[in-house]
Image (spheres, helix red, strand yellow):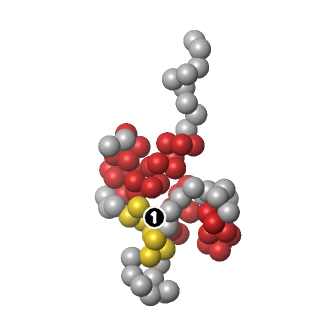
Amino acid sequence: MSNTLQRLRDQYQRDCLPLSEVMRDYFPHITSERHFLTEVRQGRIALRTVRLHESRKAPLMVYLHDLAELLDQAKPDTTDQAA
């Protein structure tokens, strides 16, 4: 388990978050869920969203392990930098 995933689990105390909460906490510059989903579909944001129920009205959710993976990929890699 990555350190990022553990921190997210400690922070949120659950395994999946509503997309609106992820947007609020990590993408405050994107104000529309529709625009966010367009960015995901076009590959600009590599984050998987799911509906926990078959209903179209069910809220979109993000699993913490997917969010942690996105955050880890966005982190600059400091291990390869020369001192």
Amino acid type, mark 1:
Val
Q: Which secondary structure lies at badge 1?
A: strand
Task: List the single residue furthest toward the top.
Answer: 83
Say above or below: 57 vs 72.
below
Of residues 56 and 11, the one nearer the viewer is: 56
Q: Percent from the top left, x then y, of residue 23?
A: 56, 63
Task: List the single residue furthest toward the front.
Answer: 42
Q: Percent from the top left, x then y, of residue 74?
A: 57, 43
At horizontal 64% and vertical 58% (from top left) the residue drawn is 43
Q: Which quadrant of the rendered structure holds the N terminus?
A: top left
Q: Percent from the top left, x then y, of residue 82?
A: 59, 14
Q: Which quadrant of the rendered structure holds the C terminus?
A: top right
Image quadrant of residue 16? bottom left
Q: Is residue 11 visible?
A: no
At horizontal 57% and vertical 55% (from top left) the residue drawn is 46
- Direction from residue 76 to residue 15 in the image, left or right: left
- Direction from residue 63 to residue 24 in the image, left or right: right
At horizontal 66% and vertical 56% (from top left) the residue drawn is 44
Image quadrant of residue 33? bottom right
Report the residue marked by disc 1: 62
Q: Is residue 38 visible?
A: yes
